[in-house]
Image: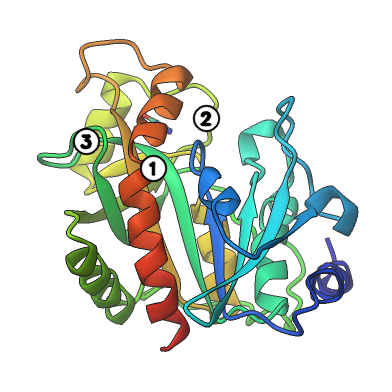
Amino acid sequence: MSYEAVEAAARAIAERTGRESHDVGLVLGSGLSAFAESLADSVSIDSAEIGFPQPRVAGHAGRIVSATIGGVRLLASAGRVHTYEGWDLADVVFGVRALVLAGCNVVILTNAAGGMGPGLVPGDLVALRDHINMVARNPLVGPNDSRFGPRFPDMSAIYPAGLREIVAKSAADVGIEYKEGVYAWQLGPSYETPAEIQMLASVGADVVGMSTVPEAIALAHMGVPVVGISLVTNLAAGISTTPLSHEEVTEIAGAARTKFTALLTNLIPRLGRT
Ligand code: HPA
């Protein structure tokens, strides 16, 4: 996907939303897209119509939703595409690049994840401190388009401490507890084996999932800071005594919706003011 294709999508977003620019971008993970539907005075676009790759799951049309929260212009994307569906990484990161060219100068990436960090239980929210790319793939492989960013971008502060402090303030404001941790990207679609989870825990990962990392790399390449939020939907393989299932993931995500919504509703205006 070329720079021009991303630019065209960003232009289409501006035209269809009637908003020349946006402030904060948001990518909604598995089971978390209800947040986009709950927004008042929003404009919703079928993302297929503006060139976004579409999730290859029946009944999961991608949507781009524009809304203002506390005066801050939010651009949310529901229905991300995953590498395990067979997409090229350039397609996987198309959406976040479009959010940035549509004006967002900070992006919140959310996901459902398995938890293996100390004390993590299903329902916990984890603000990402860093990530580990376990997939040996990278969205920046290939010719570098310097309009996106440099050939060899720095990755030492993808999830800046200053933004994590803002998450802490929001969580305190709305009275929810959350933790901080490191996210490990696994390709999927199979869940991990217990031995793989032990290895991930031993190298410092707290949560594991099948998304977020390619998008975070593409955003860091563009010089855009990331807030990463994982919802722990299950204990990771081997830590859990029961088999993992997608139903469990969506059920826990649904149950955590209230606190997730409360956190985002407080956080988005704060981020827009930074
Ligand atoms: N592993 C990988 N991805 C996931 C998990 C998990 O345990 N839970 C939700 N997404």
**Marks 3/2: CA distance?**
17 Å
**Image spot of residue 245 (x, y percent):** 42, 16
Secondary element under disc 2, as helix, strand or loop, is: loop
In front: label 2 or label 1: 1
Image quarter of residue 83: top right
Question: Is 77 above or below relative to 84?
Answer: below
**Residue placed farthest to the bottom in the image?**
274
In the rendered image, the quadrant that contains the C terminus is bottom left
Q: Which residue is mark 3?
A: 116
Q: Amino acid at mark 1?
A: Arg
Secondary element under disc 3, as helix, strand or loop, is: loop
**Marks 2/1: CA distance?**
24 Å
**Image spot of residue 213 (x, y percent):** 49, 54
Which badge, 2 or 1, is on the more N-terminal residue?
2
**Image spot of residue 106 (x, y percent):** 51, 77
**Image spot of residue 249 (x, y percent):** 41, 27
Tell me if 46 is positioned left or right of 138 in this view.
Answer: right
Judge by depth and name the residue closer to the eye, 170 or 228.
Answer: 170
**For residue 160, which numbered disc appears in the image?**
none
Q: Which residue is mark 1?
A: 257
Disc 2 residue: CB within 8 Å of ligand 1: yes
In the rendered image, the quadrant that contains the N terminus is bottom right
Q: Amino acid at mark 3?
A: Met
Disc 3 residue: CB within 8 Å of ligand 1: no
Q: Residue at x 74, y 83 (%)?
A: 147
Question: Is 8 above or below relative to 44?
Answer: below
Residue 261 in sight in this render: yes
Crowdedness near tag 1: few (<14), some (14–19) or many (≥20) residues, C-alpha within 10 Å: some
In front: label 1 or label 3: 1
Q: Which residue is mark 2?
A: 188
Judge by depth and name the residue closer to the eye, 98 or 123.
Answer: 123
